[in-house]
């Protein structure tokens, strides 16, 4: 900025993902480092909530919220997780909720699986949805 002049440095002034003025205001607060205010607003709008019970409590709440939205809309909501481990633990909790809704049956088989960091046994039941990545394993 000093070398080129502030007026010559591109700056992002608008946000496109947020659809309402309220969402844009919340995004602006987050960019300004005013997370407490933004979270207060999101909680008031019921677009964020506090999950109690540490890591396990958060995973359980995510799975229950998945089930609530699935029942309410008939569509499976997407879930994002920061790590493969988080995704694996959340998917296990979601699987329990799906079983409780009668969407999957009893485990029928177990197959070897990997998330790229660790190997584990993956139980499968009628109704499970499995994504498979094709490619060569390291060293093959």
Image (tube, grey):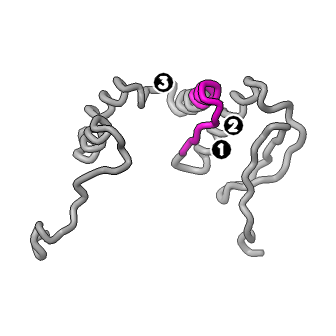
- Give how far apart the Cα atoms at labels 2 and 1 are: 6 Å
Residue at image point 65% right, 57% down: 117
Where is residue 106 shown, x and y percent of the image? 86, 31
Q: Which of the image's four quarters has the C terminus?
A: bottom right
At x 30%, y 50%, the residue is 15
Instruction: Report whether 124 appears left or right of 89.
Output: right
Q: Position of residue 36 (x, y in %)?
A: 28, 33
In x, y percent, where is residue 60? Answer: 59, 28
Quadrant of the image containing the N terminus: bottom left
Q: Residue at x 21, y 66 (%)?
A: 10
Q: CA distance from mark 3 to mark 2?
A: 19 Å
Residue, disc 2 = 92
Q: Is residue 44 magenta?
A: no
Earlier sequence position, callout 3 versus callout 2: 3
Can you tell which mark lies on residue 88?
1
Instruction: Compare residues 138 and 80 and report the one nearer the observer.
Output: 80
| Residue 48 appears left or right of 112 | left
Q: Residues within 10 Å of mark 1 (few under 14, many from 20)?
A: few
Q: Taking 69 as reference, is 9 left or right?
A: left
| Residue 34 versus residue 51 in the image, above or below | below
**Residue 38 sits in quarter:** top left
Q: Quadrant of residue 99?
A: top right
Can residue 118 be seen here? The reply is yes
Separation of marks 1 and 3 at Cα, in angstroms: 20 Å
Q: Position of residue 81 (x, y in %)?
A: 54, 45
Cβ–Cβ under 8 Å for marks 2 and 1: yes
Q: Which structural element holds mark 1?
A: helix
Residue for point 53% across, 33% down? 55
Q: Which residues are magenta?
A: 65-80
Residue sitting nearer the eye, 10 or 115: 10
Residue behind mark 3: 52
């Amino acid at each position: 900025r000093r070398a080129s002049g502030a007026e010559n440095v591109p700056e992002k002034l608008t946000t496109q993902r947020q659809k309402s003025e309220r969402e844009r205001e919340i995004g602006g607060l987050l960019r300004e480092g005013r997370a407490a205010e933004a979270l207060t607003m999101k909680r008031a709008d019921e677009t964020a909530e506090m999950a109690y019970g540490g890591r396990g409590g958060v995973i359980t709440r995510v799975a229950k919220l998945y089930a609530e939205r699935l029942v309410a809309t008939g569509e499976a909501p997407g879930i994002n997780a920061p790590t493969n481990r988080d995704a694996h633990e959340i998917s296990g909790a979601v699987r329990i909720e799906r079983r409780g809704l009668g969407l999957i049956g009893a485990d029928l088989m177990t197959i070897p699986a990997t998330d790229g960091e660790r190997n584990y046994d993956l139980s499968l039941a009628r109704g499970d949805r499995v994504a498979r990545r094709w490619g060569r394993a390291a060293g093959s």
